[in-house]
Image (tube, rainbow, N blue to C red):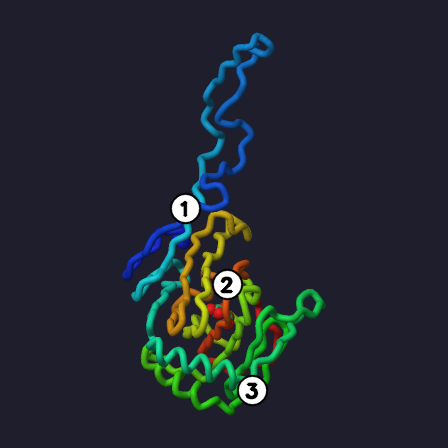
Amino acid sequence: MSDKRQRVRVQGSWAKSTPPQRGGTHRSGGDAGPCQLKAGNWGDGQRTFEFRQPAKPLREVPAEKVIEHAGEYEISQGPTGVSRLRLFPGFLSQEEADWMFSRLYAELPFSQKTNLKHGQAYDEPRLTCWYGELPYTYSNSTLEANPQWHPLLLQLRTKVEKAAGRSFNSLLCNLYRDGKDSIAWHSDSEPSLGPQPTIASLSLGDTRCFSLRKQPTLEDGGDYTYVERLKIPLAHGTLLLMEGATQEDWQHQVAKEYHDRGPRINLTFRTIYPEPRRGGRR
Ligand SMILES: O=C(O)CCC(=O)C(=O)O
């Protein structure tokens, strides 16, 4: 087993794990199954079975783990370094989170961003707005610089910087209007974010499930079947920090949900460095 697939080391605590998905244990190839009909017994009404070891060892699909308690979680360690999450449920009090959500929902200039993939334009399934001295390009489309921060966002930035122990010069705001809005698997690894970026993500409004999946090893060649998976319910007023190699070694998403969900605002504070303009890697 390579370094990247070492067991996760955790300083906080895992809340619980959900049962394996997609069928639990998988047999990865091999043409001799564990059971085979014995030749010569056809038609006599008494079939017997002979056990044979599978040609290849069985491989477990790791159970998805849930993180829901405050703490610091080293989710992996590898040649690229440690991937770390820090979770602060109740970072904002209920009362604070309530009035901040109402004001930001009413006052932020959310709009539809259109991206480009394989020459095809598509609308993101959510609304966004961007704050920062520099533009931000991802998915072959650019959010222009917007240095006029909303005063409430400046207040929140100071509070988030204190918790993170570092400063941020930019903010991507996402509005998920309902459960159908989402963000697909990606990592925040655009060159303008520099190496090993820290992303500070503050959630307001309805709870949505934030999922992470490990990048597959080279030998798995892009197959995510056996990768480690994590799930974090991001509730009103929760702050999540993604640090170290997290953007290099993991991807994240907020999937669509098919039951009622109210609106949710997610504020992701980042630091952007100047770079020649080109498309991101989402
Ligand atoms: O809404 C979230 O919690 C995640 C947002 C996100 O992944 C992003 O803006 O890159």
Q: CA distance from mark 1 to mark 2?
A: 20 Å
Q: Which residue is mark 3?
A: 145
Mark 3 neighbour class, 10 Å CA radius: few under 14, some 14 to 19, many 20 or more: some
Is the CB atom of the residue marked by disc 2 within 8 angstroms of ligand 1's nearest atom? yes
Q: Earlier in the sequence, mark 1 or mark 2?
A: 1
Residue closer to the observer: 78 or 37: 37
Tag 3, which secondary structure? loop
Residue 191 appears left or right of 96: right
Q: Earlier in the sequence, mark 3 or mark 1?
A: 1
Image coordinates for residue 99, horizontal then vertical, percent: 41, 82
Image coordinates for residue 132, horizontal then vertical, percent: 50, 86
Image coordinates for residue 42, horizontal then vertical, percent: 59, 12
| Amino acid type, mark 2 | Gln
Residue 87 appears left or right of 47: left
| Amino acid type, mark 3 | Ala
Q: Residue at x 56, y 77 (%)?
A: 128
Report the label total. 3
Q: Nearer the viewer, mark 3 or mark 2?
A: 2
| Amino acid type, mark 1 | Pro
Mark 1 neighbour class, 10 Å CA radius: few under 14, some 14 to 19, many 20 or more: few
> Which mark, residue 253?
2
Q: Quadrant of residue 256?
A: bottom right
Mark 2 and mark 3 in contact (Cβ < 8 Å)? Answer: no
